[in-house]
Image (cartoon, rainbow, N blue to C red):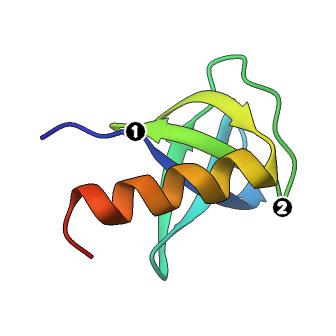
């Protein structure tokens, strides 16, 4: 199953990249033009940021993902 998962930005890197918190692990993410700052929520799929999310939307999506994977 392929999912896009909300992830919080913990650092901004060079070359249009960010580092996000992936369940306690640091995961590099390509921004490809998605504007992001530390603390922002991103919708991430396969290491690529698809969009920035507001915190309420991120929380809703995290709950849906948790239900979908049986958590």
Crowd around label 2: few <14 · some 14–19 · many ≥20 (10 Å): few
Residue 33 badge? none
Q: Is residue 16 above or below residue 60?
A: above
Q: Is residue 61 left or right of residue 23?
A: right
* Residue 39 numbered tag: 2
Q: Residue at x 20, y 36 (%)?
A: 2
Q: Considering the image in quadrants, where does the C terminus appear? A: bottom left
Question: Would residue 48 be visible to someone looking at this image?
Answer: yes
Residue 61 shown left or right of residue 53 in the figure: left
Using the image, determine if residue 15 lies above or below residue 41.
above
- As helix, strand or loop, the secondary structure at mark 2 comes to loop
In space, the residues marked 1 and 2 are separated at their CA atoms by 18 Å
Residue in the foreground of this view, choosing between 46 and 15? 46
Q: Is residue 54 above or below residue 28?
A: above
- Furthest residue to the left? 1
SS of the residue under disc 1: loop
- Indicate which label's residue lies in the foreground, 1 or 2: 1
Residue 64 x %, y %: 42, 54
Residue 31: % across, % down: 63, 29
Q: Position of residue 55 (x, y in %)?
A: 79, 54
Residue that lies at the very extreme toward the bottom in this rendered image: 24
- At horizontal 83% and vertical 61% (from top left) the residue drawn is 39
Name the quadrant containing residue 11.
Answer: bottom right
**Location of the N terminus (image quadrant):** top left
Q: Which residue appears at 64% of the width and 59% of the height?
A: 59
Residue highlighted by disc 1? 4
For marks 1 and 2 on the same chain, the one whose residue lies earlier in the sequence: 1
């Amino acid at each position: 199953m392929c999912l896009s998962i909300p992830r919080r930005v913990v650092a901004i890197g060079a070359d249009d990249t960010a580092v996000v918190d992936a369940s306690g692990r640091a995961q590099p993410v390509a921004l490809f033009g998605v504007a992001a700052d530390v603390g922002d929520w991103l919708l991430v799929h396969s290491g690529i940021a698809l969009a920035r999310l507001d915190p309420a939307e991120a929380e809703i999506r995290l709950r849906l993902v948790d239900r979908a994977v049986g958590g």
